[in-house]
Amino acid sequence: MTDLHRRSLFAGAAAIGAAAILPGTARAQTRWQVATPYPDGNFHTRNMRAFVEQVQQASGGRLAIQVHSNASLLRMPEIKRGVQTGQVQIGEILLSAYGNEDPFFEVDSVPQLVTSTAQARKLADLQRAYVEARLNRQGLSLLYWVPWPPSGLYTNTAVESVETLRGLKMRTFNTLTNRFATLCGATPTLVQQAEVPQAFATGVVNAMVTSAATGVDVQAWDFCRFFTPIGFTRTKNAIFVRQRDMAGLPADVQAAITAAAAAAETRGWAASDTETVERQNILQQRGMTIGTPTPALMQGLARIGATQADEWVAKAGDEGKRLIDAYRAAIA
């Protein structure tokens, strides 16, 4: 037996002994995995890491959580199913990307329905019970959700009206932005965030509608000249846990997760407002022109938004009508 082998055996025995001495820590540690499609620099991912750190500290070492960012473990379309099947315990998704599954996941993507943080909060408060009920039926629990900064148009020419978008190849990220592109006369192409630079570089798309935060993530100044903020939507990321895994934790650790989630939601909403200004400034510093939306553009967007709101209600049925009616009454 070599000296190296002996040292390895000794180290292993020492580790086993330590675990026996501290039965509530190393031996009982539970390991969780988190999948998110966003890069480490994104404010959603930073918020997720702060949430994870708070949970791990509160658990006293009984729960270890590893975050897999930038779609490194699962791509966006795979994350929800990955949590349901136990491949990962926590997932983060753009909720509206799953609008084909249920219209209540995508209501925050109706163009111009929400044009301020106050309105976004009203819609989120009213939408929450519907979303939680649907996730619960699938064995999932919503931990927290956080909106993106308002979306705007990324183009290589100034956008004077909706007609400017006609004929462009527009990158979209969910069913409702697909429909928006079509109503504008553009050709929609669904592209995941991590794949945006390549899609522009290869000519698959030449315009997009998304937030300034995403624009910075994908370095939009490399392929677009104009960003026109239009208060398009305040789509939300949803962070959820597999109920079976949550239920397997000690009660105090479950409570710690719930508390950390509430803190992450508060922190994330504040960060979203901060990002709105900071990331738009970065786009400008990198050479992009920040456009001022014209009255003609906003009128055209309002018409499209009204059409899409009616289409959403028709798809969502009576519950959807109740939600929209309650929301409109709340912001009146």
Image: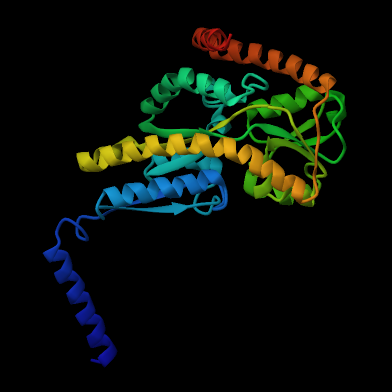
Quarter of the rendering occupied by the N terminus? bottom left
Applied colour scheme: rainbow
- Residue at horizontal 29 percent and vertical 39 percent from the top: 246
Residue 220: percent from the left, percent from the top?
Answer: 74, 47
The quarter of the picture where the C terminus appears is: top right
Along the line of sight, the residue nearer the viewer: 277 or 122: 277
* Relative height, residue 31 to residue 98 (above, below): below
248 left or right, relative to 77: left
Where residue 43 sits: x, y (%)? Answer: 54, 45
Q: Residue at x 25, y 43 (%)?
A: 253
Q: Is residue 271 left or right of residue 67?
A: right
When asked about the image quadrant of residue 144, the answer is: top left
Up/down of 179 relative to 88, above or below: above
Q: Is residue 166 left or right of residue 304?
A: right
Residue 225: where, in percent of width, then height? 83, 44
Q: Is residue 167 left or right of residue 317?
A: right
Count of numbered badges drawn on the protein = 0
Q: Is residue 134 visible?
A: yes
Coordinates of residue 319 in the picture (x, y in percent) = 49, 10
196 shown above or below 175? below
Q: Nearer the viewer, residue 147 or 309?
A: 147
Residue nearer the viewer, 119 or 203 = 119
User: In terms of image quadrants, where is residue 210?
Assistant: top right
Q: Residue furthest bottom?
A: 2
Splitting the image into 4 quarters, where does residue 265 fall? top left
Regarding residue 87, the answer to whether it shows in the image is no
Identify the residue shown where x is 78% and y is 41%.
205
